[in-house]
Image (cartoon, grey):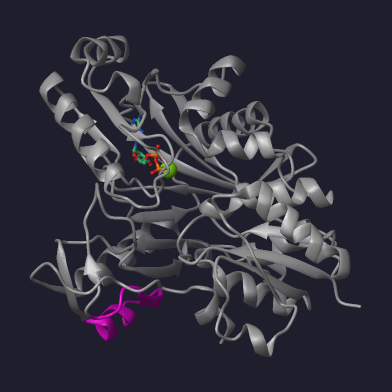
Amino acid sequence: MPRRVLLVLPRRTYRARAFLAAARRLDLEVVVGAEEPSTLAPRHPGAEVLVDLHQPGASARRVATYAATHPLDGIVGVDESAVLVAAHIADRLALPFHPVAAVAATRDKRQLRRRLAAAGVPQPRFQELPGSVAGDSAAAAAVLAAVGLPAVVKPVDQAASRGVIRVDTAGEFVAAVARVRALLAADPECAASGPAPLLVERFAAGPEVAVEGLVRDGVLHVLATFDKPDPLQGPYFEESCLVTPSRQSPARQARAATVAAAAAEALGLIDGPIHAELRWDGNEARCLEVAARSIGGQCSRALRLVDGATLEEAILRDACGLPPARLELVPGAAGVLMLPIPAAGTLDGVGGQAAARAVPGVEEVTVTVPRGGRLVPLPEGDRYLGFLFARGPDAATVEAALREAHRRLQVRVTEPDGPAAVPPSGPVAAWR
Ligand SMILES: Nc1ncnc2c1ncn2[C@@H]1O[C@H](COP(=O)(O)OP(=O)(O)O)[C@@H](O)[C@H]1O
Ligand SMILES: [Mg+2]
């Protein structure tokens, strides 16, 4: 009997294909936890159960009813918006995953900061700016004074740098607070009624790394440390280049792993993937955040494990109780460049893709917004334009290949107000 795994696949995810392919390679029977019935579901009876990402408890009850007749061996929430539901389901069915409280803390940056502070994990100085004091300029000024400039204003529950703004003056701070609250108020996905709570942090000016790993029985196993070689000085923090192995000193890499492990432990993340981001401020690696999931977008394609496995296979193996994958990358360096969105408007096309693919070391060029799709730059934007992947003997060569390939692309953007971009790969697209 093949093992059965529930993949919670949000409507808008870039992670569906990679997880479905991994499940296929591991011979797992996949049940999709979907937000809406897929058009192909009737042909796969029993292969889909509906979940509401905003109702984790109710979703877990529904899955439990389903599992009474279709026992599940494992569960994976494939990205950020799915992990809380996944944790509730895992809790109810006694399947391996991080506990609900730990995952909930990663989904609210205020809770994350409080837990790290209580455990003494290095992080930027921070203050909460509750929605209830919106309009109280003295309260806002006090928050800023406690943090100090330069500072960063951010939402408590977004991802991919959406709404994250650096401020260098009190005037910029007031404008940023208003802008972030406005973008959250305009978002139908945001649950908050009234002015949203925000987080204000001290800006950490040093280099940034991402630590990708799997926690097994409370022990963090680091698979990769990525450098983010862009300057990332703000005011917005568009994610672009990620390259592994890191070119930080071995001592710094070790410190980043230690702080990431301490952060995971402080949060109670004990069984499943984590993605931690850290930044140096002076001589210390400070934890920006830890997510209870693997790396976002399509970036995991940059990671190739020895034994031919993918990151998703490693995650599925742990989730389903299969023999664990060896968490070691193939030799050499790899990287991904998330295509920056050059301007607001409608995507008319991306030229030069063949030339970009021809750069030695470049393995893949993928544009994930269709022609005619809307492009919204940060801080408001919330989707990736596309991804470039490269591989080479060392990190510097890989970064150079990615930059050269990017230079060869022409992203054509026309006037604003085009049709909204369709999701890059939802459950429906992923079944094909
Ligand atoms: N306190 C900070 N100091 C320096 N840079 C920061 C800080 N907070 C956020 N950033 C930058 O903004 C990016 C996104 O912030 P983050 O808190 O990770 O939000 P998200 O959940 O949207 O990824 C970070 O990767 C980093 O580059
Ligand atoms: Mg982040």
Quadrant where the C terminus is found in the figure? bottom right
Q: Is residue 223 something that shows in the picture? A: no
Quarter of the image for residue 284 reads top left
Q: Is residue 229 magenta?
A: no
Looking at the picture, tell me which residue is in the foreground, 12 or 412.
Answer: 12
Q: Position of residue 17 (x, y in %)?
A: 56, 75
Residue depicted at x 21% and y 79%: 372
Task: Point out the stretch of residues depicted in magenta.
Answer: 352-371
Q: Is residue 80 something that shows in the picture? A: yes
Residue depicted at x 25% and y 50%: 380
Quarter of the image for residue 254 reads top right
Q: Compared to 45, does 326 lie above or below?
A: above
Q: Position of residue 19 (x, y in %)?
A: 62, 69
> Across the whole image, how many numbered discs are drawn on residues?
0
Quadrant where the N terminus is found in the figure? bottom right
Question: Which residue occupies the extreme right position in the image?
Answer: 1
* Residue 11 shown left or right of residue 69 in the figure: left
Q: Is residue 368 magenta?
A: yes
Q: Position of residue 353 (x, y in %)?
A: 27, 82
* Residue 375 shown left or right of residue 73 in the figure: left
* Residue 311 shown left or right of residue 191 in the figure: right
* Residue 42 shown left or right of residue 219 in the figure: left
Question: Which residue occupies the extreme bottom position in the image?
Answer: 43
Looking at the picture, tell me which residue is in the foreground, 135 or 240.
Answer: 135
Q: Position of residue 354 (x, y in %)?
A: 28, 86
Residue depicted at x 54% and y 50%: 54
Quadrant observed for ligand 1 in the rendered image: top left
